Image (spheres, rainbow, N blue to C red):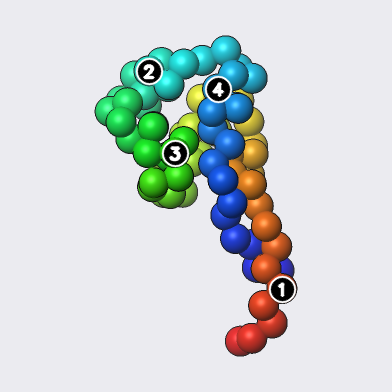
Amino acid sequence: MKWELGSCLLDQRLVDCGMSRLELAAALLVKPERINDYIENTRVMPLKVAISIADTVKCDVRDLYELRSSSSTSF
């Protein structure tokens, strides 16, 4: 099955774990602007970053984005 990314759910995950965007940026040693880019859907998280974020906010990496199944069957 093919999946497409929908909206980023990082803001909700941060609320769930009681962490701010600035705290997450500091924990990952990245600029806060990068976290904002992910949340505002102007940049997609690379897999390594998504794994680090999921580990930091204690969620599954699949919980960081809405996932939509694609019905494309072409090969």
Quarter assignment of residue 13: top right
Q: Circle 4 — which element? A: helix
Image x and y of residue 45, in percent: 43, 45
Residue kind at label 2, given as amino acid type: Leu
Amino acid under label 3? Glu
Q: Check residue 22 in the rendering and tell me which mark sits there, or answer none.
A: 2
Residue extending farthest to the bottom is 75
Q: Earlier in the sequence, mark 1 or mark 2?
A: 2
Left or right: 6, with 41 as reference point = right
Check disc 3 and report the residue beneath it. Answer: 40
Q: Mark 1 points at which residue?
A: 71
Q: How far apart are marks 3 and 1 (CA)?
A: 26 Å
Q: Mark 1: which amino acid?
A: Ser
| Quadrant showing the C terminus | bottom right
- The residue drawn where x is 43% and y is 21% is 21
Residue 34, image x, y percentages: 33, 35
Q: Are marks 3 and 4 in contact (CB under 8 Å)?
A: no
Residue projecting furthest to the top = 18
Q: Give how far apart the Cα atoms at labels 1 and 4 are.
A: 31 Å
Identify the residue shown where x is 60% and y is 60%.
4
- Badge 3 crowding class, 10 Å Cα cut-off, few under 14, some 14 to 19, many 20 or more, is some
Counting labels gives 4
| Mark 1: few/some/many CA within 10 Å (<14, 14-19, 20+) | few
Q: Name the residue under label 4.
A: 14
| Residue at disc 2, secondary structure | helix
Quadrant location of the N terminus in the rendered image: bottom right
Name the residue located 71 percent from the left edge and 73 percent from the top edge.
71
Q: Residue type at mark 4?
A: Leu
For marks 3 and 4, the one nearer the N-term is 4
* Alpha carbon separation for disc pair 3 and 2: 15 Å
The crowding category of the residue bearing disc 2, from other C-alpha atoms within 10 Å (few below 14, some 14 to 19, many at least 20), is: some
